[in-house]
Amino acid sequence: MISRRVLASLTAAAALPPAGPARAAIPAWTIATEYPPTSLPGEGIAAFAAAASGSGALAVTAAYNAPDGLRSAAMPAAVAEGRLAAADAFTGQLATAMPLLGIFVLPFLTTSAADAWKLWSLARGRVDALLAARKLHLLYATPWPPAGIWSRQPVTTPADLAGLRLRTFDQASTTTFRSAGAAAEAISFADALPRLRAGDLDAVLSSGDGGAGARLWEVLPNFTPLDWAWPLSLAFCGREALAALEEPARQAVLGAAGETEGRQWRAMDTRLEENATRMAASGVAVQTPGPALDAVLRTAAAPVVDAWAAAAGAEGAALLAAARGR
């Protein structure tokens, strides 16, 4: 005979709705950068993650400051191999494997946000093809404010470059500053910070942007604007990872990419003023470069640009001519 307690349990169980299939977990992505969250690339991956996750079809997490030691140069391989879903990487570091991307960091080629946008518009299709050949899908580009020299002591004349232990960010900047007398070395942003604190570097070629600038002025109290270049970082994901998503999640990624690119370029309208205000409030001494320093750097840069154009072939030369308006 069934006890009242067992009968009650059976009755309650019968009243429950039939169990359905377990709901599948939504895909989870991470997008990474080697820069701090308040730099423009850092803000970009945060905006992308929020926009892509907003549909509920995908969960995207932003990771900053070179997570797991991952620098820009290694990010394309990490994404293509599926070790990371997406990344935002600096073109100066990507140019070693994809030389055409070096055009975005050529000295004195882009001197305004408008120049940077024109160059990006001209080159975008080719960049898309370069990434696709490496199993990557281009998401968006982030512009950087122009680079200058962060230094322990003011740098305003050619003599100040003599022997200066300077972090540069690509082959073009390294060759140019060595020709001008500096002891220049191409180092990733993440690797430069500990070397600065250890006293192994005197100066850093970098923009004054956001959190990147904040990390630098902890050690380097002077900034000399050079209008060196308005470079780009590129965000991309794995083509296989994108194709593996269900359509709602795939559309969330593509929509977020478009939204983020618009956001990044609009940010340049006020970014220089915001950075200048932040630097002044933090006691950074903004130096005025003398005309002799500008002349020396431009002279040293000219053969570097010519060498890049020769190595980039007809396609690179045509792109350079178009960027110059010829």
Image (cartoon, helix red, strand yellow):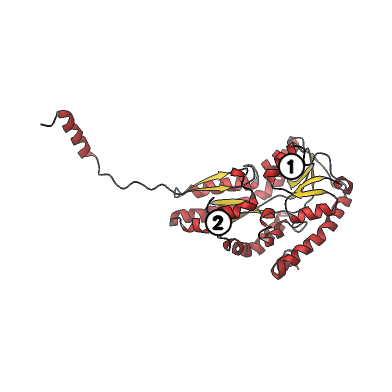
Q: Classify the position of the N terminus by image quarter.
A: top left
Q: Amino acid at mark 1?
A: Ala
> Which of labels 2 and 1 is toward the front?
2
Q: Amino acid at mark 2?
A: Ala
Identify which residue is drawn at 53% across, 52% down. Answer: 256
In the figure, residue 2 lies in which quadrant? top left
Whether residue 169 is situated above or below residue 6 in the rendered picture:
below
Residue sticking out furthest to the bottom = 314
Q: Position of residue 35 (x, y in %)?
A: 64, 45
Whole-number angstrom distance, CA of label 2 to CA of label 1: 38 Å
Q: Residues within 10 Å of mark 2 (few under 14, many from 20)?
A: many
Instruction: Decide which of tag 2 and tag 1 comes sooner along the chain.
Output: 2
Q: Is residue 151 left or right of residue 102?
A: right
Task: Kindly indicate whether the residue at mark 1 contacts the one at mark 2 (C-beta within 8 angstroms).
Answer: no
| Direction left: furthest residue | 1
| Residue holding disc 1 | 276
Q: Quadrant of the C terminus?
A: bottom right
Residue 36 visible, this orientation = yes
Q: Secondary structure at mark 1?
A: helix
According to the picture, the residue beneath numbered tag 2 turns out to be 80
Task: Identify the residue at image location x=64%, y=51%.
Answer: 72
Q: Which quadrant of the view contains residue 224?
A: top right
The answer to whether residue 268 is above or below residue 240 is: above
Compared to 124, does 61 lie above or below?
Answer: above
Q: Position of residue 106 (x, y in %)?
A: 75, 58
Residue 262 in view, yes or no:
no
245 horizontally vs 155: left or right: left
Query: x, y percentage for residue 144?
Result: 69, 50
- On the image, the x and y values in percent for residue 174 come to 77, 53
